[in-house]
Image (cartoon, rainbow, N blue to C red):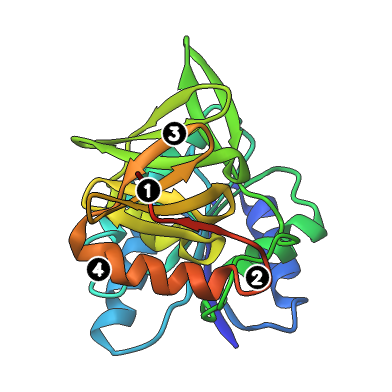
């Protein structure tokens, strides 16, 4: 059962959100706050008292401490709650992704979308393989001053680029402001594995594992990617589990 906090400076919207959350059988308790400062104070108080908070549903545009600022502050907590933005504004999806929100809901909130957001707050359960039928996730990226949504399933691999990560797909590549370690935590259930200090690969797009000169190499889409010695054993074991029921070419290389 989940304990959540709903934050919105508009009272009717806050009451509606709290009502919908309380109707969900997975929710144990719904707390509310009408501004960011009150929400922050309540969260600090709960942490000090050793109380659990699983998720925060928060508006973005609020006077004083807005939702994005509040999200950045919660990231410093020992065990930060998962964040779901609930907003009337479509133009903040990229910033929400950067602060590692698990979902982004547009007002008026639909019950089915809220139910999906609640599901994403639930503790992750380990999976032996990526489920091809699992719901796809889209990643908001800035491109030419516009926000584009890229399918997670379309991403071949992710490459660390300083404070950014470059997502490579069959149609092109896109920069997002996030560390590779953070992306690895978020996408582990979707079948993304670390193959190198700077590379995260989607298992669904691996067509071949081979060894050239004693070094492991992966064929991912149309790209050939090296596997570091440190990750070789882990990658091979995971691929064996992942492709137990699916053919995978493992060549010796030439």
Q: Which mark is residue 77?
A: 4
Relative to 82, is 110 on the left or the right?
Answer: right
* Position of residue 222 measured from the top left corner of the image (x, y, whole percent): 51, 31
Residue at 65% x, 70% y is 119
Q: Which mark is residue 253?
A: 1
* Position of residue 51 measured from the top left corner of the image (x, y, whole percent): 36, 88
Residue at 30% x, 75% y is 79
Determine whether label 1 and label 2 are within 8 Å by CB: no
Relative to 192, is 72 on the left or the right?
Answer: left
Q: In what quadrant of the picture does the C terminus appear?
A: top left
- Snapshot quadrant of residue 173: top left
Label 4 vs 1, first from the N-terminus: 4
Disc 2 is placed on an element classified as helix
* Position of residue 201 measured from the top left corner of the image (x, y, whole percent): 43, 50
In front here: 88 or 102?
Answer: 102
Q: Which mark is residue 223?
A: 3
* CA distance separating discs 4 and 2: 22 Å
Disc 4 is placed on an element classified as loop
Structural crowding at the residue carrying mark 4, measured as other residues with C-alpha within 10 Å and reported as few (<14), some (14–19) or many (≥20): few
Structural crowding at the residue carrying mark 2, measured as other residues with C-alpha within 10 Å and reported as few (<14), some (14–19) or many (≥20): few
Q: Which residue is mark 2?
A: 119
- Snapshot quadrant of residue 27: bottom right
* CA distance separating discs 1 and 2: 44 Å
């Amino acid at each position: 059962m989940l304990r959540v906090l709903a934050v919105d400076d508009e009272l009717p919207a806050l009451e509606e959100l709290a009502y919908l959350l309380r109707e969900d059988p997975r929710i144990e308790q719904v707390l509310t706050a009408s501004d960011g400062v009150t929400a922050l104070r309540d969260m600090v108080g709960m942490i000090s008292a050793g109380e659990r908070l699983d998720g925060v549903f928060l508006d973005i545009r609020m006077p004083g401490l807005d939702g994005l600022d509040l999200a950045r502050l919660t990231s410093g907590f020992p065990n930060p709650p998962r964040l779901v933005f609930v907003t009337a504004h479509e133009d903040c999806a990229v910033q929400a992704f950067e602060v590692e929100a698990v979902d982004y809901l547009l007002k008026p909130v639909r019950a089915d979308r809220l139910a999906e957001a609640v599901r994403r707050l639930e503790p992750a359960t380990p999976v032996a393989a990526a489920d091809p039928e699992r719901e796809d996730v889209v990643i908001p990226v800035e491109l030419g001053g516009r926000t584009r949504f890229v399918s997670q399933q379309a991403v071949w691999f992710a490459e660390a680029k300083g404070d950014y990560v470059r997502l490579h797909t069959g149609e092109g590549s896109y920069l997002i402001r996030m560390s590779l370690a953070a992306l690895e935590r978020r996408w582990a259930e979707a079948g993304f594995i670390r193959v190198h200090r700077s590379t995260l690969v989607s298992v669904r797009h691996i067509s071949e594992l081979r060894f050239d000169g004693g070094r492991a190499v992966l064929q991912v889409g149309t790209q050939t990617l090296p596997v570091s010695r440190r990750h070789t054993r882990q990658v091979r074991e995971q691929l064996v589990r992942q492709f137990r029921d699916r053919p995978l070419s493992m060549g010796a290389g030439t």
